[in-house]
Amino acid sequence: MPRIARAIATGYPHHVTQRGNYRQDVFLDDADRTLYLSFIQEYSQKNKLAVLAYCIMSNHVHFIVIPEEDTSLSNTFKLAHMRYAKHFNQKTGYGGGHLWQGRFYSCVLGQNHLLAAVRYVERNPVRAKLTDKPWLWRWSSCAYNCGEVSESLITLTGLSGYLAGSAFDWQAYVDSADYELFTNGLKRSTMTGRPMGAPDFVADVEKKLDRRLHALKRGRPLK
């Protein structure tokens, strides 16, 4: 799927993911994960990037973030990933080229897709059969967002402002399976860089960024 030039819409949530080159492991132990998150913490705060959710796997990462500035997203992940790659190469003597598979993937999310996207991110370890309950995976935001722990490994912007009332049971929601139709759509939007949301939301983002972001319908070219 061809990827468009990156679309960053300040004030809107974004899904961000990046994997190791050739799907190789980029985190070998807990010390690697801890150091990586410290870099994300440092650069997200410096670059005014709010983190709503994250999940660190062995060969890839997922984040749901909200950039305050046009450069918040790129500066955070570019600098954090460059610095982590330097650590990894020094630690392992890795000389096989780039640690990360190109530039990170991202897409803007409509508010009506936000919670499902967070659930998708936090359920990664369950889909990988690493745990039965997503909040038991230490290297994600799930335990914090479920109220299982009082502190997160990095500073998080809580989900409370996005939940439909105080009675919303996030733990029950994240413990339920993802919808395949949604996950396929999220993957497609993230890989192409196009916004994920209703047509009116996409139109709002296009107006904000002054560029076309929706895919054109396929058909016979006009004569």
Image: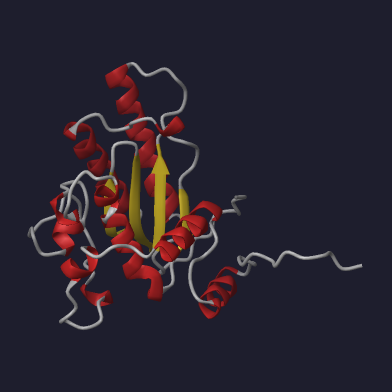
**Count of numbered tags:** 0
In-image side of 48 versus 75 (left or right):
left
Q: Position of residue 104 (x, y in %)?
A: 46, 45
Is residue 103 at least partly visible in the picture?
yes
Q: Is residue 94 above or below residue 3?
A: above
Q: Is residue 27 above or below residue 18?
A: above
Q: Residue furthest right?
A: 223
Q: Residue at x 22, y 59 (%)?
A: 156
In-image side of 181 versus 53 (left or right):
right
What colour scheme has been applied to the protein in the rendered image?
Answer: secondary structure
Q: Residue at x 33, y 63 (%)?
A: 178
Of residues 127 and 186, the one nearer the viewer is 127
Indicate the quadrant containing the C terminus: top left, top right, bottom left or bottom right. Answer: bottom right
Q: Position of residue 184 (x, y in %)?
A: 46, 59
Q: Quadrant of residue 109?
A: bottom left
Is residue 48 at least partly visible in the picture?
no
Q: Residue at x 42, y 65 (%)?
A: 182
Q: Residue at x 64, y 67 (%)?
A: 212
